[in-house]
Image: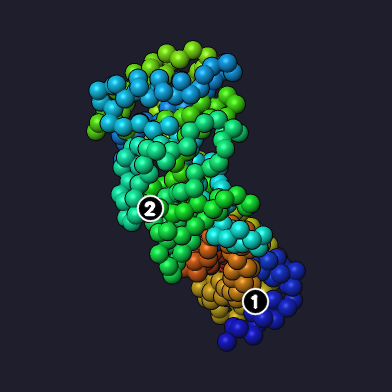
């Protein structure tokens, strides 16, 4: 049996054995953590947007002239855009799907200890559900007379009603019907009644990244503040969006005192969101690959050093009749023992690391299949890294090895 000599050898070469174990444990922890973060980053990639984003145009103008009558500009913009033959509907908004940046915290009660829920609130007029082509699941959509319009800091009160997505309803009221319930959009503010529940649509990168892609709220509100002109979402006939970008831009430029920051199809907005996510995932994968290569070369270097230090032992074994494969197998088995110890430690560290990331992000990224797959891959790489130097040592003639020793 070679197990006893292996443990005696490990005891004799404690420093190198510890290096191997530590290297394997750290590699498994970092590599599996990187893989878990990568898969968590990409898991929302192919989710349906919930809206006909190929046929919706996002227009984002901004004022530089503070003397402009924003309310009249809003009326004129809507009239000009609606007059375009291919336009089906349009709504002024403050946030856009795939591009929503402002995460807002809402509450189910007014107390200071109330549980917090994160969401994206989309404001717009009564046309917004039609622009996004949302399906009504329960309740009703907003009426025109319920839309609050005005400059943000001059509003006498916020709308007393909201609509929420199906996903948001399940989060807020998992055991009850959300329709008719009240929520608080701000602490200390008046509550808002939920009058309708609509089909899910994707919010923005900030919540999408944490697996909360469909947590949205619609608020019957059209506002502007400082130099920020209301943006617009415009649904057009199928296949006409790309050809209307310049037309819509020209219509918006008919209002003096502002510039048009962006006019694009929401497909482009979605791509920009995923481009950032893809870059992040690629960076993590590159780091993981480099780490794996470093581990392989480091392991090969350590084994080469071990082999060099034990040439007399190898020569003696070969002189006593050990075959080349016996020598190779010995080193691979010894490496397997060290790698297994490192893997066990690494598994514990990987699980702890995943729990820490889950606690920080609020998304459960732990998936043991990825951790075990990473562990198997590390074992395979380590065995390959050991095989080559061990085979090279076994090929040296016993007489030469013992004489040089």
Name the spot of residue 62 as percent of width and height, x first.
Answer: 52, 23
- Residue found 53% across the figure and 63% down from its top: 364
Q: Seen in the image, is 77 located left or right of residue 389?
A: left
Residue 338 seen by the camera: no
**Image vertical order of residue 175 relative to residue 104, above or below:** below
Name the spot of residue 32 as percent of width and height, x first.
Answer: 55, 61
**Image vertical order of residue 40 relative to residue 13, above or below:** above
**Residue carrying label 1:** 316
**Image vertical order of residue 81 relative to residue 270, above or below:** above
**Viewport quadrant of the C terminus:** bottom right
User: Mark 1, residues whose alpha carbon is within 10 Å: few (<14), some, or many (≥20)?
Assistant: some
Query: Which element carries disc 1, helix, strand or loop?
Result: helix
In the picture, the disc for residue 196 is 2
Name the spot of residue 66 as percent of width and height, x first.
Answer: 59, 18
Residue 336 seen by the camera: yes
Name the spot of residue 142 as percent of width and height, x first.
Answer: 38, 44
- Residue found 52% across the figure and 19% down from its top: 69
- Residue found 42% across the figure and 59% down from its top: 180
Tell me the quarter of the picture where residue 98 sits.
Answer: top left
Of 23 and 280, the residue lying toward us: 280
């Amino acid at each position: 049996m070679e197990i006893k000599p292996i443990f005696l050898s490990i005891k004799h070469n404690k420093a190198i054995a510890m290096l191997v174990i530590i290297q394997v444990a750290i590699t498994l922890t970092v590599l599996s953590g990187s893989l878990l973060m990568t898969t968590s980053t990409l898991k929302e990639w192919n989710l349906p947007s919930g809206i006909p984003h190929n046929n919706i145009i996002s227009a984002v103008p901004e004022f530089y002239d503070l003397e402009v009558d924003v309310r009249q500009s809003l009326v004129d913009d809507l009239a000009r855009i609606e007059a375009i033959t291919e336009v089906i509907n349009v709504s002024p908004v403050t946030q856009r799907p795939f591009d929503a940046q402002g995460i807002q915290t809402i509450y189910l009660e007014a107390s200071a200890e109330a549980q917090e829920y994160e969401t994206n609130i989309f404001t717009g007029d009564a046309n917004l559900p039609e622009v996004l082509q949302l399906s009504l699941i329960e309740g009703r959509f907003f009426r025109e007379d319920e839309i609050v319009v005005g400059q943000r800091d001059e509003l006498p009160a916020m709308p007393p009603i909201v609509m929420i997505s199906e996903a948001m309803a399940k989060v807020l009221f998992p055991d009850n019907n959300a329709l008719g319930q009240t929520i608080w959009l701000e602490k200390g503010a008046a509550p808002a009644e939920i009058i309708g529940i609509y089909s899910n649509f994707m919010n923005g990168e900030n919540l999408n990244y944490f697996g909360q892609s469909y947590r949205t709220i619609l608020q019957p509100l059209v506002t502007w503040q400082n130099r920020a002109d209301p943006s617009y979402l415009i649904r057009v006939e199928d296949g006409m969006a790309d050809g209307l970008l310049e037309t819509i831009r020209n219509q918006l430029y008919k209002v003096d005192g502002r510039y048009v920051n962006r006019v694009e199809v929401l497909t482009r907005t979605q791509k920009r969101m995923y481009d950032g996510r893809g870059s992040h995932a690629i960076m993590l994968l590159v780091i993981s690959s480099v780490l794996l290569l470093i581990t392989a070369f480091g392991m090969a270097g350590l084994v080469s050093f071990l082999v060099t230090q034990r040439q007399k032992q190898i020569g003696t074994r070969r002189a006593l009749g050990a075959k080349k494969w016996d020598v190779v197998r010995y080193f691979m088995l010894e490496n397997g023992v060290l790698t297994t110890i490192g893997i066990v430690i690494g598994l514990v560290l990987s699980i702890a690391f995943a729990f820490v990331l889950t606690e920080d992000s609020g998304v459960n990224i732990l998936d043991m299949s990825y951790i075990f797959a990473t562990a198997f891959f590390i074992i395979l790489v380590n065995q390959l890294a050991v095989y080559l130097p061990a085979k090279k040592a076994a090929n040296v003639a016993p007489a030469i090895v013992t004489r040089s020793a």
